[in-house]
Image (cartoon, grey):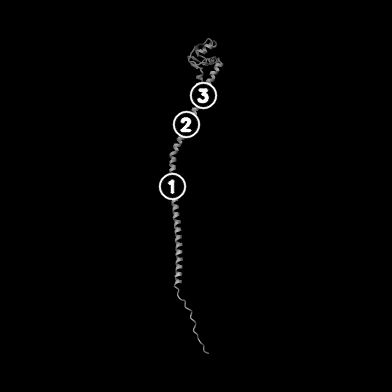
Amino acid sequence: MSRVIKAGRAAPSVPFNFEDVTSQATAALTQVRAEAAEILAVANRDAEAVRQQAEAAGRLAAEGSLAQRVEEQVASRLNDLVPALTQAAAELRDAKQAWLAHWERQAVHLATAIAARVIRRELRTAPQIPVDLVREALRLAAGPSRLRVLMHPDDLGALGPELQSLLQSLGSGASAELIGDAAIEPGGCRVETECGSVDQQFSVQLARIEEELL
């Protein structure tokens, strides 16, 4: 049996299209350019981050160095200021003590001035006070045989009899002389002996009290 061999049908040929190739190449180039741009952008961001980190590190180092210099300057200034502050504190303390001492003196002066006024007022209402002062002075000056009692002339004129009676009570072993002396303040007296004197003037006694208080 004979067979008939038929030639197979050939595949149809496709014509070459230059525009398609160009389009594909353009698309590939565009993609490559985009990827390259992305890579460049990433690289730029990394470089900027590195720059900022370096800048921050440098700034921190500079700030640390500046802080150290400031601390050293402050410490140096404190070393200079501490003696001055100590001296200022001492001067302030001395000034405070001087101020307190001044006002203490003023208070004592005021107190003695008030006491003097009170005494002068009491003398007007109690004229026997000078006699009591003479009696006390004679008791303090007991011992010497010769006494001189100095009083203001007004007190001596007003209290003469009582004073004479007081002196006579000393006994025969002592002699006393009453002397009017305008230098003696009214209300006071001064008894003089060979051994010294007893001053019973109010101003003198107040001055002694003031001196003791101060």
Using the image as rendered, state which of residue 121 and residue 173 is in the foreground: 121
Give me the C-alpha separation between circle 1 and circle 2. Answer: 41 Å
Q: Secondary structure at mark 3?
A: helix
Closer to the camera in the image, 69 or 142? 69
Residue under label 2? 95
**Label 2 – label 3 distance at C-alpha:** 22 Å
At mark 1, the secondary structure is: helix
Amino acid type at circle 1 is Leu
The residue identified by callout 3 is 110
Disc 1 target residue = 66
Residue 24 at x, y percent in the picture: 46, 69
Residue that appears at 45% across and 56% down: 48
Q: Which mark is residue 28?
A: none
Extreme residue in the bottom direction: 1
Which of the marked residues, 1 or 3, is nearer the chain's N terminus? Answer: 1
Which circle's residue, 2 or 3, is located before the other in the chain?
A: 2
Amino acid type for the residue under numbered disc 3: Leu
Query: What is the tally of numbered marks visible in this picture?
Result: 3
Query: In this rendering, is residue 21 above or below 45?
Result: below
